[in-house]
Image (cartoon, grey):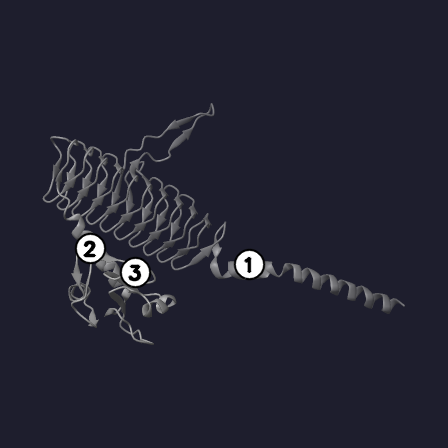
């Protein structure tokens, strides 16, 4: 697809500097872009490439002051990164609109239903009483178990498995290989040392505007629901156990594991490889640094790091002191020698 600078500016509400008729047909990084490509500049560290890039059109912040002439047509916006993201979303939406209809072979139960302008890829499986909303895309090799509901404008990428009774909202994106609704890790210890499986009869509810990365697993609740609330963003390779609740607009990075029945508040930021024990509460707006081990509840707005995780500022102070231990040891040794010398002089 080819777009003019004027068309792009209209989509992102930008102001043009240069030739509004300049056209582009693809995207490129500002340091590598070629003629006919669109780039953006948001990070000041890359400003030097603004004056050397071959990109035809560049989106920049409206308050950026140019240090020298720029060959490309510029589109000024309040936030270049946000505008570029919006443009990519629009482009992706246009590409996905080309997908529609039901490919064969696929299995759709007689009791399943789907709305208008949907796409159901080959080898997809839609079980009994499955409901798929308008404009939703179900890519090949997706499994939707009995009674699964998927809302409107959602995208379920290849190989996703959604077990029975789970509910997926509107404008949700689930990436390849993710499993939603598998059994929670519930086993009752027995007197003979064996473990008896506890049936997991709940479900998973994923609310609107959630994005879930590839190969993430979200376990169904033992009773009730595991809930991912609206606006939450989950990275690849995350494990969320039974009866967990993830709050609105919370972000969780890759390789994090959240144990059963823990409640994560809204607007929480969780770094990669974080481990969270079960049955605790993470307050609204809390921040957990990467590779932290969280063993107790965290107050709203608090930042923690380490394993076990504790106050972020205190942790940095401790780290700074630990680096000075060799120097402190040397000073203590010198002080001991000085004290010993003074005592000897006093005795003599």
Q: Nearer the viewer, residue 130 or 191?
A: 130
190 in relation to 326, above or below? above
Q: Is residue 75 visible?
A: no
Badge 1 or badge 3: first in the primary sequence: 3
Badge 2 or badge 1: first in the primary sequence: 2
Residue at point 85%, 65% (across, down) = 344
Tags 1 and 3 in contact by the CB under 8 Å rule?
A: no
Cα distance in 3D space between marks 1 and 3: 42 Å
Quadrant of the image containing the N terminus: bottom left
Splitting the image into 4 quarters, where does residue 52 fall? Answer: bottom left
Quadrant of the image containing the C terminus: bottom right
Tags 3 and 2 in contact by the CB under 8 Å rule?
A: no
Depth check, mark 2 against mark 1: the one in front is 2
Badge 3 or badge 2: first in the primary sequence: 3
Secondary structure at badge 2 equals helix
Residue at point 35%, 55% (across, down) = 268
Find disc 1 in the rendering and name its residue: 319
Q: Point out which mark residue 168 bears.
A: none
Find disc 3 in the rendering and name its residue: 33
Splitting the image into 4 quarters, where does residue 28 fall? Answer: bottom left
Find disc 2 in the rendering and name its residue: 91
Q: Nearer the viewer, residue 328 or 158?
A: 158
159 in relation to 63, above or below? above
Return the residue found at the far top: 192
Q: Nearer the viewer, residue 108 or 208?
A: 108
Depth check, mark 1 against mark 3: the one in front is 3
């Amino acid at each position: 697809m080819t777009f003019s600078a004027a068309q792009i500016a209209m989509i992102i509400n930008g102001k043009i500097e240069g030739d509004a008729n300049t056209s582009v047909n693809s995207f490129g990084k500002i340091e590598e872009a070629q003629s006919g490509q669109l780039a953006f500049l948001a990070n000041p560290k890359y400003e030097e490439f603004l004056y050397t890039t071959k990109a035809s059109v560049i989106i920049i912040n409206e308050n950026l002051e140019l240090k020298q002439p720029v060959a490309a047509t510029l589109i000024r916006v309040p936030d270049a990164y946000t505008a570029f993201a919006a443009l990519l979303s629009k482009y992706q939406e246009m590409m996905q609109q080309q997908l529609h209809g039901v490919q064969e072979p696929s299995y759709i139960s007689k009791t399943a239903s789907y709305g208008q302008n949907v796409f159901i890829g080959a080898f997809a499986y839609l079980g009994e009483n499955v409901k798929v909303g308008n404009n939703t895309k179900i890519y090949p090799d997706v499994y939707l178990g009995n009674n699964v509901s998927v809302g409107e404008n959602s995208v379920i990428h290849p190989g996703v498995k959604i077990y029975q009774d789970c509910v997926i909202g509107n404008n949700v994106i689930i990436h390849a290989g993710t499993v939603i609704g598998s059994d929670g890790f519930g086993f009752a210890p027995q007197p003979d040392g064996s473990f008896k499986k506890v049936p997991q009869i709940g479900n998973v509810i994923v609310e609107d505007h959630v994005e879930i990365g590839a190969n993430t697993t979200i376990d169904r609740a033992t009773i009730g629901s595991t809930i991912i609330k609206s606006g939450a963003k989950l990275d690849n390779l995350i494990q969320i156990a039974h009866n967990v609740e993830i709050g609105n607009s919370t972000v969780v990075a890759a390789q994090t594991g959240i144990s059963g029945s823990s409640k994560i508040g809204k607007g929480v930021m969780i770094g990669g490889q974080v481990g969270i024990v079960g049955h605790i509460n993470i307050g609204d707006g809390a921040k957990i640094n990467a590779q932290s081990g969280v063993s107790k509840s965290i107050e709203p707005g608090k930042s923690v790091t380490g394993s076990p995780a504790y106050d972020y500022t205190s942790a940095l102070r401790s780290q700074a002191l630990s680096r000075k231990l060799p120097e402190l040891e040397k000073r203590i040794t010198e002080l001991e020698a000085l004290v010993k010398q003074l005592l000897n002089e006093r005795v003599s």
